Image (cartoon, helix red, strand yellow):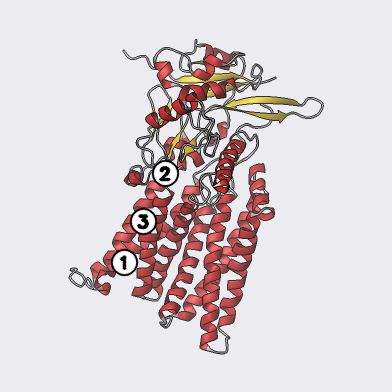
Amino acid sequence: MLEVVRWGMVIDLKRCTGCHTCTVACKAEHHTPPGVFWAKVVRVESGKYPTVIRQAVPLLCMHCKEPECEKVCPTGATKKKADGTIIVDSKLCVGCRYCAVACPYGARCFTPEWKDYFTGEKKPSSQFAEYSKKKWLEESDRGVVSKCNFCEERVADGKKPACVNACPTEARTFGDLDDPESEVSQLIKKRRGMQLHPEYGTDACVYYLPAR
Amino acid sequence: MAQSASSSQRGVCVMQQEDFKPGARTQMEWGFGGRRRWRDGALLMALFLGGIGAGQFVVSTWLIHSVESALVGLVVVGVGKTAAHLVYLGQPKRFYRLFLRPKTSWISRGLIFMVVFVAFGAAYLAPDIGFDWVPWETGSSLSDLLLAGAILSAFLVMVYDGFVLLSCKSITAWNTALMPPLFFTYAIAGGTAMTYLTLIAMGSEIPNQDTLTTIDSVLLVSLFALLVIYILNMTTSTATARESLRKLTTTKVAIAFVGVAIFAGLLVPLSLTLYHEVAATETVASVLLAVSSVLELSGDLSVRHSILRAGLHAPVFSEGL
């Protein structure tokens, strides 16, 4: 019998220091082009004087249970896998970007072409940059939309997603949301895990544990 | 070379600033000034041409029975809108895939409406444009059926872009029930203006001119009312909607929205349309009507541009996380 899982992630905002290791780990893992960030960290201020805090909030695709992006995609390139992961098939995408506009979390990136960080004749591109470009063009395409895929190839090998693996403060936990005994389910239950924008009815699979 | 290098780097910077911005984020995908700057404007042109072309077909066939003007409308949609969509797409070779998900996607639905409209419209006009071998004649019941199909699908082409914007839940400036009626009314008004311009350019007389002028004036007043409601609605909506309104009224976008769309595109054409009836000579009346039509069309384009540019995504996280 097939084991049914629903992958999800819990991010502890109390632990996140905003070091951007997840951003870099994701870029190194997926060879995303310059200007394309599947995992990012933004800094927000909340509260009122004198109890104001400046908080780092990591963002990625929320792999929603009711994904807006999948609903609006006219080509069927955006798909929901049995384990709840939302993926984009770059061979089917036409680059209309309806998904990028409809996604409330800004998780989707459009790459019209590979734009190097440096321009001009003598580009100080490293070997790694050239390798990244080659890999990206092999695995994805120009003129299509891309996004976080919860590192499906790593997860299939029994590993954790690159951002979870690299996080130095262990702010991220990855696991099965459908298993009530899993670490993610326990964290959500015990520490009041929250989804972003529950009012849109997307039922996001990435939860945040409050900073205070 | 140096200039293109700097604009290329600016492109990367724009992306990074928006991606790591904590507050409301400007949508960077549709319309002029998007990620691909000018090329993304092709989508705006597609929405504009779809609206005015379908509107022109409806006005020309239903109200004034002008085959030439209806044909121009059909070509604007069939060629202009299609070409604009192809220019916009990241992978134009796969365009056929856009039709595959009409159950859930408004883009699929809209493009199917467009194909149905062009097919019915072309079939209806065929006997009048030289294809007299077709087994129906203008005025026959089959021809009337084709016209009904063409007009119905034209209505859907005019209104679907409103639904495309309405379906984006996190962009409060778009996620309002006013979008479909606003885009529909603009399409009809733009269609009327296109009809005037086509007939004036051909040197033809404008049949039912009084009715058409009255309809045009009513449409302009309705559009003004819809825009006022749209603005008032935003003032009482979320913080993101108020930020969109600020963008529409106080930033560079205000030139397009307040200056071109409201003043030049609505108020001036309304005065000219009313004044042209009392113009001393027919030539003066025609010139006034042509100027009014050009202004109306520029207002139509500007309002669509402004609404796209004022599209702000609500901040991803709310206060107090």
* Mark 3–mark 1 distance (CA, rounded to whole Å): 15 Å
Looking at the image, which residue is at 40% across and 19% down? A153
Q: Amino acid at mark 3?
A: Met
Query: Which of the image's four quarters has the N terminus of chain A?
Result: top left
Q: Amino acid at mark 1?
A: Leu
Q: Is residue A74 above or below residue A55?
A: below
Percent position of residue A9, x then y: 52, 20
Sooner in the amino-acid sequence: mark 1 or mark 2: 2
Can I make out residue B27 in this image? no
SS at mark 2 in the image: loop
Q: Chain of mark 1?
A: B
Looking at the image, which residue is at 56% across and 31% down? A198
Q: Where does label 2 land, which residue? A: B90
* Mark 2–mark 3 distance (CA, rounded to whole Å): 20 Å
Q: Which mark is residue B114?
A: 3
Percent position of residue B186, x then y: 51, 62
| Quarter of the image where one finds residue B22 | top right
Sooner in the amino-acid sequence: mark 3 or mark 1: 3
Badge 1: few (under 14), some or many (20 or more) residues near its Cα, within 10 Å? many
- The front one of A125 and B203 is A125
| Quarter of the image where one finds residue A137 | top left
